[in-house]
Amino acid sequence: MKYTLIDGENGVTVRIEGQLDAISTADIRPLFDQITERRPRLVTLDLSALRLIDSSGVGAIVSLFKRVRADNGDFQVRGASGQPLAIFKLLRLDRVFSL
Amino acid sequence: MQRGSTLILLRFQSDLRYRNLVLRATQAAAKLVGQGDHPVFDDEVVAACSEAFNNIAVHAYPETPGEVEIQIEVHEDAVTIRMLDHGRSYELEEQPDPDLESLPESGLGIFIIKSFMDQVVYRPGAPNLLEMTKRIVSRPEQAATV
């Protein structure tokens, strides 16, 4: 898994590539903690290069979503496709994230 | 093993380092089922297998890795995946479906397995056996038995 953090005028974008799973989730959670500490107005997850996600990865994203929203920030997910999109649809997160 | 099917056998320790090996084998096996491309079928089989292996690595052997055997049986129109372990067992029927409206952050693995696979059977014992089957044309109902 590889991630890229992009700071923009309107907020923060995190691009996640590869697999977000039981192993790699431990690597991205500290980044998510850093992001929420900054209380950005908008957090965008770019999942266009994410090939695989498991329930651990979903949990990390949902946790981030809840924390951003609790601080009155906006949260967007874009580019989900393939297996990650199938998981989001099963868990009804496509409605939450407007996918 | 059914006549005319192909069996892929993997045996290793329940370390999450082997996750990719398991998922790549599962994905390759799913592609052999039926005719033509069926990416949704493949994705759902891989997702279920991913959760099942995670459960063994994390919950069946929580302290030290133990032996896992994975049998991937490819039929003409279905794939059956069996995972055998000698770790802690559980009761499949006692795993509640998550309340999706509350946006749960954990406890989703069994739900994903039961949702994506057509038939899920778990038999605690020596070894514990989780058997999952998915057909190219999925049946609307699913059965989970112990």
Image (cartoon, coloured by chain):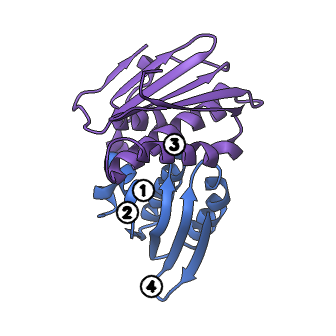
Chain colours: A blue, B purple
Give yes or no for contact between labels 2 and 4 (Cβ–Cβ under 8 Å).
no
Q: Nearer the viewer, mark 1 or mark 4?
A: 1
Q: What amino acid is labelled 1 in the image?
A: Pro
**Residue ID at (55%, 67%):** A17
Quadrant assignment for the C terminus of chain B: top left
User: SS of the residue at dot 3?
Assistant: helix
Give yes or no for contact between labels 1 and 4 (Cβ–Cβ under 8 Å).
no
Residue furthest bottom in the image: A9
Q: What amino acid is labelled 3 in the image?
A: Thr
Residue B124 in the image: state x and y as whole percent.
Answer: 55, 13
In 3D space, how far apart are the residues under numbered discs 3 and 4 (Cα atoms)? 41 Å
In 3D space, how far apart are the residues under numbered discs 1 and 2 (Cα atoms)? 6 Å
**Residue ID at (26%, 35%):** B138
Quick check: B35 above or below B91?
A: below
Q: Which residue is mark 1?
A: A84
Viewed as shown, does residue B137 lie left or right of B18? left
Q: Quadrant of residue B84?
A: top right
Q: Quadrant of residue B80?
A: top left
In 3D space, how far apart are the residues under numbered discs 2 and 4 (Cα atoms)? 25 Å
> What number is the disc on residue B26?
3
Give yes or no for contact between labels 1 and 2 (Cβ–Cβ under 8 Å).
yes
Q: Which residue is mark 2?
A: A81
User: SS of the residue at dot 1?
Assistant: helix
> Which residue occupies the foreground of this view, A7 or B82?
B82
Do discs 1 and 2 belong to a common subunit?
yes
Residue B117 in the image: state x and y as whole percent.
Answer: 37, 34
Q: Which residue is mark 4?
A: A10
The chain letter under disc 1 is A
> Is residue B114 visible in this depiction of the protein?
no
Give yes or no for contact between labels 1 and 3 (Cβ–Cβ under 8 Å).
no
> What number is the disc on residue A67?
none
